[in-house]
Amino acid sequence: VQFYNAFEDDNYVYIVMELCEGGELLDRILAKKDSRYTEKDAAVVVRQMLKVAAECHLHGLVHRDMKPENFVFKSPKEDSPLKATDFGLSDFINPSRKFTDIVGSAYYVAPEV
């Protein structure tokens, strides 16, 4: 999601961002007939998610909480672009440091973690 500007007063910080009116990816998944995406639909979504991860990594950033709730659609249209949100757990890549923190959403963490 595009960041435009930020303002603050004595009590708050106001962040102006791109308006995305298409809802969360999770809601679209659950709204599909029989709660299923076709393989073709899923491939389109996963491709966009992987592009986000690649772009983050290109800029030295790790999102660390990629899940359907953290992706929104720009518009309600079926072919709307997918946008990443919630970079609150993200961190910059440092080659001399190994990521060992357990972060993210418990529901999506691999069982071996």
Image: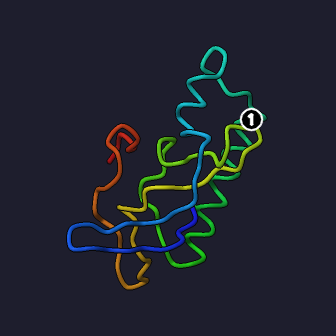
The correct choice, above or below, for 15 with respect to 48 in the image is below
Camera-nearest residue between 50 and 113 = 50
24 horizontally vs 88: left or right: right
- Residue 4 in the image: x percent, y percent? 54, 71
48 horizontally vs 28: left or right: right
Residue name at image x 37 percent, y 85 percent: 96
Residue name at image x 53 percent, y 69 percent: 3
Amino acid type of the residue tagged 1 in the rendering: Asp
Camera-nearest residue between 48 and 7 = 7
- Residue 51 in the image: x percent, y percent? 67, 60
Q: Residue furthest left?
A: 11
- Residue 78 in the image: x percent, y percent? 75, 36
Query: How would you rate the neighbour count of disc 1 (Cα within 10 Å): few for under 14, some for 14-19, many for 20 or more?
Result: few
Residue name at image x 48 percent, y 45 percent: 67
Camera-nearest residue between 39 and 77 = 77
| Image quadrant where residue 34 sits | top right
In terms of secondary structure, where does tag 1 sit? helix
Residue name at image x 48 percent, y 51 percent: 66
- The quadrant of the rendering that contains the N terminus is bottom right
Q: Which residue is mark 1?
A: 41
The correct choice, above or below, for 28 with respect to 47 in the image is above
